[in-house]
Image: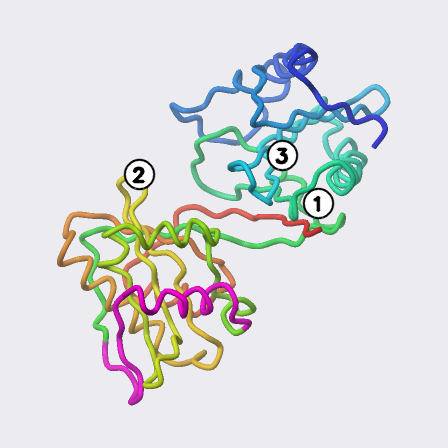
């Protein structure tokens, strides 16, 4: 780790010069679809929100750009991993990833470190090289999580919701069930440890339920005793409709409860917003959720891997 240099506003030119070199000799070799928001020069300008590192390895080096989503965010994310040589990229990364891991464990206070690798799709920023380097990163203790986006066009047919088993009922959101929802999504081992997952922070989750759109369109399945066993949170972000936190407890694995709640949600959204495309973010190994989505006209369009190092 002794060769890792953290760039400050005073030393930003050292980083910027290497970015300029990469634009000429390295970046053209990366497979990505350039979009209108792409601007590789942004890595040449210092920002207090970013962390800029140079790992010097003999005559070579590796550049890193890391960031937190917001103040207090306990996850450090990598947006740039850029070795100095295309031909030596694997050799450099093999030596550099252990160094940046040690830097994270000793110099940063975040609880987790995510390096994201796009496998297929269009993105709004320049990709890291982790697409080539997943095995190296995993060998250094990062756990891979395989994600994907799916979308449902407005013209797609909706599956019929069917019927719930006796003892189960569909429940709309109300303030009186908020504590139960928090327990279901954030404290229940049955939910947390299964393939279904929550994809927002606790604070973001609470903010969602201050929005009329989420309050009016989210659905939950409860047992007669009020226990929540399945849920879907519907949100709107950048004018897109999202189905978030699609979850079913393990007790109901293998039943039709996931199919039911998703179909019921889609039928309602299709009536209210007949022209809208609907999006969902899933773990690819959440087979029951993926199959439910396919039955309801969703198709995948972007795949990536989050490699996660937990402190």
- Residue 266 lies in magenta, yes or no? no
Which residue is depicted at the point 28% across and 49% down? Answer: 241
Q: What residue is shown with label 3?
A: 129
Using the numbered discs, state the Cα–Cα distance from disc 1 to disc 3 in whole angstroms: 11 Å
Q: Residue at x 40, y 76 (%)?
A: 229
Q: Position of residue 147 (x, y in %)?
A: 50, 52
- Quadrant in which residue 233 is drawn: bottom left
Q: Does 270 sit left or right of 47 as displayed?
A: left
Residue 238 coordinates in the image, percent (x, y): 31, 38
> Where is 86 relative to 264, above or below?
above
> Residue 65, located in which quarter of the rendered image?
top right
Q: Badges 2 and 1: C-beta atoms under 8 Å apart?
A: no
Q: Nearer the viewer, residue 169 or 123?
A: 169
Residue that appears at 41% across and 60% down:
245
Q: SS at mark 1?
A: helix
Residue that label 1 marks? 137
Give the residue number, with chain letter if any, for mark 2.
238
């Amino acid at each position: 780790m002794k060769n890792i240099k953290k760039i400050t506003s005073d030393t930003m030119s050292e980083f910027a010069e290497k970015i300029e070199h990469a634009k000429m000799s390295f970046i053209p070799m990366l497979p990505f679809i350039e979009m209108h928001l792409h601007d590789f020069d942004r890595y040449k300008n210092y920002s207090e929100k970013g962390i800029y590192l140079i790992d010097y390895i003999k005559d070579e080096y590796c550049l890193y750009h890391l960031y937190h989503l917001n103040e207090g965010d306990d996850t450090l994310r990598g947006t740039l991993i850029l070795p100095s040589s295309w031909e030596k990229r694997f050799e450099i990364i093999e030596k550099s990833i252990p160094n940046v891991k040690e830097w994270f464990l000793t110099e940063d206070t975040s609880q987790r470190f995510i390096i994201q690798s796009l496998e297929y799709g269009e993105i709004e920023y320049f990709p890291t090289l982790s697409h080539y380097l997943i095995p190296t990163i995993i060998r250094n203790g990062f756990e891979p999580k395989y994600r994907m986006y799916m979308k449902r066009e407005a013209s797609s047919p909706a599956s019929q919701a069917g019927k719930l088993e006796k003892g189960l009922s569909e429940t709309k959101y109300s303030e009186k069930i908020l504590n139960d929802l928090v327990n279901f999504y954030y404290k229940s081992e049955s939910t947390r440890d299964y393939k279904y997952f929550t994809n927002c922070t606790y604070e973001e989750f609470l903010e969602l339920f201050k929005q009329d759109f989420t309050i009016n369109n989210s659905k939950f399945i409860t047992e007669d005793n009020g226990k929540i066993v399945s849920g879907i949170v519907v949100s709107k972000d950048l004018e897109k409709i999202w189905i978030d936190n699609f979850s079913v407890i393990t007790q109901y694995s293998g039943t039709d409860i996931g199919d039911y709640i998703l179909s019921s949600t889609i039928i309602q959204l299709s009536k209210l917003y007949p022209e809208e495309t609907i999006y969902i973010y899933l773990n690819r190994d959440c087979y029951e959720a993926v199959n439910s989505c396919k039955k309801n006209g969703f198709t995948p369009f972007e795949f990536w891997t989050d490699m996660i190092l937990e402190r």
